[in-house]
Amino acid sequence: MERRMLGKTQEELSIIGLDLEKLLVSEDTYEIKRFLEKFILGGVNFFEISPTFEPKDVTAIFPINLYRDKLFIAGRSYSKSSDEIQQDIKELLAKFNLQYLDLIQIIVNTQEGIHRILGPEGALEGFFAAKNLGLVKYIGFSTNKERIALKLLESYDFDSITFPLDWMNWYTGYGRKVISKAKEKGTGIISKQSLIKKITKVNSEKGISDLLYIPSESYEEVKTTIRFSLTKPITSILCSSHINLLEWLIQAADEFTPLDIQEEENLRKSCEELGKVFNPKNI
C-alpha cells in the first residue's frame, strides 16, 4: 500500500489508517485479530486508539503488539488540561500494552477548548511533559469545525490535523481553507472518514429537501470517496467504519488512481442539489 509523509515529521503513513473503535466493539476476538493481521500484512501501518475503548480480550490486539515497531499508533484524547491528557496517555499505553504513542490527537470543537489547551496547565504543557518521558512523539488535533481548525493552525505548529474531507463537503465550500492553511504551514493532514454519504430527500409536508446521512452502500461509492480524498494533498484517510466496509476500503486504497479533471467536474455537478440543503457555516 502507498505511503505518504506526515507533514514535517519524516514519518511515513499508509494512505489508509484505521480507527479501532468500531472494530473493538465486536464480540468476536478471533475476527478482530484476523482483520488486524490482514490489514497490517496488507500494508496498513496507521492505527488510532481511544481511552474510552479497550479490547475485551488482549489476544485480539496481539498483531498490534507483535508488529509495533513497524506501526504508527495515534491516541485520541478529549482532555484539555495537562494532568488529564497525561493520564489519558498512560491509560492508552496500559490498555493496549504499549511503551509509547507516536501521536496524541486532541479532540477540539469549541473556542473554550482552544483556550484551555493552549493556556497555563493546558494539554499542550501535558504533551511536553509526556514527550520528555518518552511516552509520546507528536501532537495533533482533530476537529470537524472549520473555524476551530483555522484558529488552532494559526496558534501553534501542530504536527498534524485530522479533519473530515470528502467531495460532498468540498464542493459545497467546506474545508478548502483548512487544507490550504495546513499545507502552507507544513502540518500533516489526516482525513477523517466514516464512509457515510449525504443524500437529499424531498419532504413534501414541509416543502423542503431534508439532508440524510446513510452508510455507503456499494464498493463504487467507497472507491469514489477514497479517490477524491487521496487526490487532495493529504497523508492518510483515518477511517472509522464497521467491519463489513473495511474490506472495500483496503481494496479501494490498493486500486487508487487520482481523479482526472472530468471526474472531479462530475462530482461537483452531483453536489448542486446537496448544496441547496447543506450549509457549511452551520458546522
Image: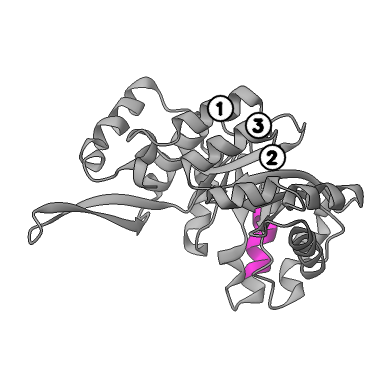
Of mark 3 and mark 2, the one earlier in the sequence is 2
Q: Nearer the viewer, residue 119 or 224?
A: 119
Does 257 appear above or below 89? above
Q: Of helix, strand and loop, which one carries label 1?
A: helix
Residue under label 2: 13
Residue 55: name its quadrant. Answer: bottom right
* Residue 243 percent across, percent down from the top left: 52, 63
Q: Badge 1, how many Cα within 10 Å: few under 14, some, many 20+?
A: some
Residue 149, numbered label: none
Q: Is residue 136 above or below residue 180?
A: below
Q: Position of residue 276 (x, y in %)?
A: 21, 41
Determine the residue positioned at 52% across, 34% down: 230
Q: Specify whether residue 257 is in view.
A: no
Residue for point 28% across, 45% down: 278
What's the residue at 67%, 58% (across, down)? Answer: 77
Cβ atoms under marks 3 and 2 closer than 8 Å: no
Residue type at the position of mark 1: Lys
Q: Rounded to the nearest whole Å, what is the CA distance between mark 1 and mark 3?
A: 9 Å
36 inside magenta stretch: yes
User: Real-space Cα distance between discs 1 and 2?
Assistant: 21 Å
Classed neighbour count for the residue bearing mark 3: other residues with Cα under 10 Å, few (<14), some (14–19), many (≥20): many
Q: Which residue carries the number 1 mark?
A: 181
Scheme by which the image is coloured = one colour
Q: Residue furthest front?
A: 120
Residue bounds of the magenta highlight: 32-39
Amino acid tagged 3: Thr
- Residue 252 rendering spot, x and y as whole percentages: 49, 43
Let me know if residue 34 is in the magenta part: yes
Q: Which mark is residue 187?
A: 3
Name the magenta segment's main secondary structure.
helix
